[in-house]
Image (cartoon, helix red, strand yellow):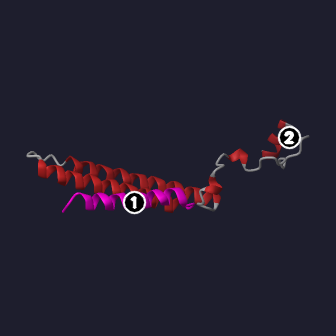
């Protein structure tokens, strides 16, 4: 097989993943798009490893070893990323990336007064909590 076929397929997969990362708002779909981009890189690594092993007399298969490393990193990334997305979804009720821009706790009620009256002192607060 000629090298151009897997290279073109890899470019198409990478462009599809890049579009998914830039256009999607759901965090899970963004993670799936990142996985698609990593699989395009894996396809390139294996294709170039096979192509170079035909020309070289010594076969090291370094492209295939890097592909295994990339698959392991991608599995860890998806596990941690999905755990973060689920935790954020439980706390915020949404996984929409545009709605999650302000993640600091103090910025949710920006511009609003607090519920405690201004005349309450620290000692009164301590007695109320005790």
Name the quadrant of the N terminus.
Answer: bottom left
Residue plotted at (9% across, 45% down): 58
Gap between marks 2 and 1 measured at Cα:
57 Å
Residue 70 place in picture, x, y as percent? 32, 50
User: In front: 87, or 96?
Assistant: 96
The magenta-colored residue range is: 1-26
User: In front: 82, or 123?
Assistant: 82
User: In front: 6, or 20?
Assistant: 6
Query: Residue 47 falls in which quadrant of the image?
Result: bottom left
Q: Which secondary structure type mostly characterizes the magenta part of the structure? A: helix
Say which residue label 2 marks: 124
Above or below, 89 relative to 58: below
For numbered disc 2, what is the local secondary structure?
helix
Which mark lies nearer to you, 2 or 1? 1
Above or below, 104 relative to 12: above
For numbered disc 1, what is the local secondary structure?
helix
Above or below, 46 relative to 130: below
Residue 30 place in picture, x, y as percent? 50, 58
Residue plotted at (81% across, 47% down): 111
- Residue 49: say if magenta: no
Left or right: residue 45 compared with residue 115: left
């Amino acid at each position: 097989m000629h090298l151009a076929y897997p290279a073109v397929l890899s470019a198409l997969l990478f462009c599809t993943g890049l579009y998914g990362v830039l256009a999607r708002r759901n965090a899970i779909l963004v993670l799936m798009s990142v996985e698609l981009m990593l699989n395009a890189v894996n396809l390139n690594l294996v294709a170039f490893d096979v192509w170079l092993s035909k020309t070289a007399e010594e076969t090291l298969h370094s492209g295939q070893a890097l592909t295994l490393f990339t698959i392991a990193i991608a599995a860890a990334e998806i596990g941690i990323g999905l755990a973060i997305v689920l935790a954020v979804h439980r706390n915020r009720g949404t996984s929409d990336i545009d709605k999650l821009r302000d993640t600091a706790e103090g910025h949710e009620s920006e511009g609003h007064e607090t519920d405690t009256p201004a005349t309450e002192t620290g000692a009164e607060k301590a007695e109320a909590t005790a």
